Amino acid sequence: MNQFRFLLLLLLEEIARILVEFLEVAITSVVFLKGIYPRGAFERRRYLNVVVHKARHPQLNEYIHSAVNGLLPFIDKGLVDRVAVIFFVDDGVPIERFVFKLNVNQSYTSKVEQADLEFSLRSFLIKLPVSEPLTKVLPRTYFQSLPQPSTSKDAEMWITTDTKQWQQPSLIIPIKSMSSEPLGLQLYLEHPSLSEPKN
């Protein structure tokens, strides 16, 4: 392997690592924002010089950590298009999704300053708390964090979460987006269509 190819792989691995670390913090922030656990179940921390919340309960913390870190090899290979945090009601019906749409340019060859990338990601963490009025007030719910289905063979091991209500065009509310080579990232909120699915 030539030196240029080795540097490119190292660059993409570092971007994937930073992105996975960011997603872990952002997903924890979404869970905190939705209030499905008491506020006391979280502690305030700093990440990228922004106040964020970290789960105090070891099982919740480990669940989010392992789910997101399990994405690292797939993000590194460019196999993950979206990561969704899905909130369900008691009967297992998903009623709200926070979707992180990822675009990592696998052929990007220039050096990326970590500080520049982190500055761009920081804006998402600032925007999340002010997006709370855009979300639905949820009855008793639970959540799941899964990557969205991809056309890739390697990504087929993930569980799809589509139900009838998501087969119609959903209501999409953009929260934040950035495009800073080699990373493009969008965060949007998705609610199921209010109309009945057509058979």
Image (cartoon, grey):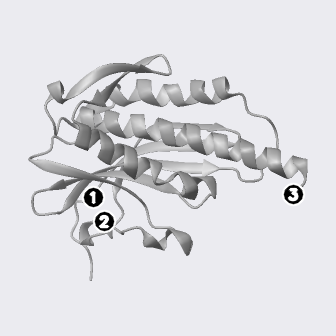
- Residue highlighted by disc 2: 166
Q: Residue at x 73, y 44 (%)?
A: 10
Q: Residue at x 18, y 50 (%)?
A: 142
Q: Position of residue 135 (x, y in %)?
A: 26, 39
- Residue highlighted by disc 3: 1
141, above or below 151, in the image: above
57, above or below 107, in the image: above
Residue 78 picture quarter: bottom right
For the residues labelled 1 and 3, the Cα–Cα distance comes to 48 Å
Q: Nearer the viewer, residue 194 or 36?
A: 36
Packing grade of label 2 (10 A; few <14, some 14-19, many >=20) is some
Quarter placement of the N terminus: bottom right
Q: Residue at x 31, y 26 (%)?
A: 53
Q: Position of residue 84 (x, y in %)?
A: 38, 52
Mark 2: secondary structure: helix
Q: Tell me whether the residue at label 1 lies in contact with that at label 2, contact meaning CB atoms closer than 8 angstroms.
A: yes
Which sits earlier in the primary sequence, circle 1 or circle 2? 2
Mark 3: secondary structure: loop
- In this image, 144 relative to 146: left or right? left
- In this image, 173 relative to 9: left or right? left
Q: Amino acid at mark 1?
A: Pro
Packing grade of label 3 (10 A; few <14, some 14-19, many >=20) is few
Q: Position of residue 197 (x, y in %)?
A: 25, 73
For marks 1 and 3, give the one nearer the viewer.
Answer: 3
Which sits earlier in the primary sequence, circle 1 or circle 3? 3
Q: Amino acid at mark 3?
A: Met
Q: Which mark is residue 192?
A: 1
